Amino acid sequence: MTRQRLIILIAALAVAAIIGLALAPKVDRLVDNTGPNGEAGANVQSVGKPRVGGPFTLVDQTGKTVTDKDFQGKYMLIYFGFTFCPDVCPTELQVISGALEKLGDKAANVQPIFVSVDPDRDTPEVLAKYVKQFDPRLIGLTGSAEQIAAVAKAYRVFYEKVKEQPADGSKAADADYTVDHSSVAYLMGPNGEFLTFFPPGVSPDQMAEKIASYL
């Protein structure tokens, strides 16, 4: 399987998982609306919320410790990736930046966030150089391996370090690896609640229109 096909498969599985998670916790509850004279009456209500997102403690590109509470009151537009990503991450970050441009003044309510799934290489200094290539509003977050694992689990993000074997068949160095990961952007509400997600292939116009519907 080629790397491109693998990325597409991972993205498809991630989208399917998110859709499943978004639907599974919503339980149909039968509510008794029996009238005062005993006439029948009932309706179905959906209760519960998708289990996507949650508290996190990470480090931004300036070296400052930040938590999810630092973004309360803002709509978080979160994407997970890594700075050595050759194609998918740059493409999606450009889409996010383009969507923010199309939102105009409304973008002031949206905080774009890039969370690294490669904490070994993506130090705050590396992230600082990386995120400014895409948008000045973009915040880069990293942390310990344990912290990244925790936030990835909360957001249902798959990632896996994969060794890149040299073409000559020699042993790969420790730094010779890539990271396969799900490629999905999440829109979270002002209180950290999950609102929607954007799979690969969404255009800046489509993303901006969807975000605007929540603002």
Image (tube, grey):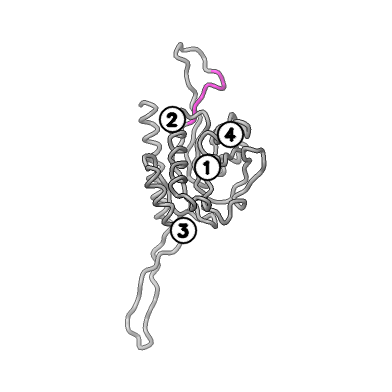
Q: CA distance from mark 4 to mark 1?
A: 18 Å
Other residues around mark 1 within 10 Å, as few (<14) / some (14–19) / many (≥20): some
* CA distance separating discs 3 and 2: 33 Å
> Residue at (45%, 37%) from the top-left corner?
94
Q: Could you say where residue 151 lies in the image, as x and y percent from the top left? A: 55, 44
Q: SS at mark 4?
A: helix
* Callout 4–callout 2 Cβ contact below 8 Å: no
Disc 2 or 1, which lies upstream in sequence?
A: 2
Q: Amino acid at mark 4?
A: Leu
Q: CA distance from mark 4 to mark 2?
A: 17 Å
Within the image, what quadrant is residue 61 found in?
A: top right
Query: How would you rate the neighbour count of disc 2 (Cα within 10 Å): few for under 14, some for 14-19, many for 20 or more?
Result: few
Q: Amino acid at mark 1?
A: Ala
Q: What is the CA distance from the residue labelled 1 to the residue labelled 3?
A: 18 Å
Between 122 and 54, the residue placed more toward the observer is: 122
Closer to us: 208 or 67? 208
Cβ atoms under marks 2 and 1 closer than 8 Å: no
Q: Residue furthest bottom?
A: 37
- Where residue 16 appears, x then y in whole percent? 37, 45
Sequence-wise, which precedes: disc 3 or disc 2?
3
Real-space Cα distance between discs 2 and 1? 21 Å
Read off the magenta span.
173-179
List the residue tagged with mark 2. Answer: 87
Amino acid at circle 3: Lys
Q: Which residue is mark 1?
A: 152
Q: Secondary structure at mark 1?
A: helix
Residue at 64% over, 46% down: 66
Nearer-N-terminus badge (4/1) = 4
Residue highlighted by disc 4? 127
Instruction: Please name which of the two marks, 3 or 2, marks the residue nearer to the observer.
Output: 2
Q: Which residue is tagged 3?
A: 49
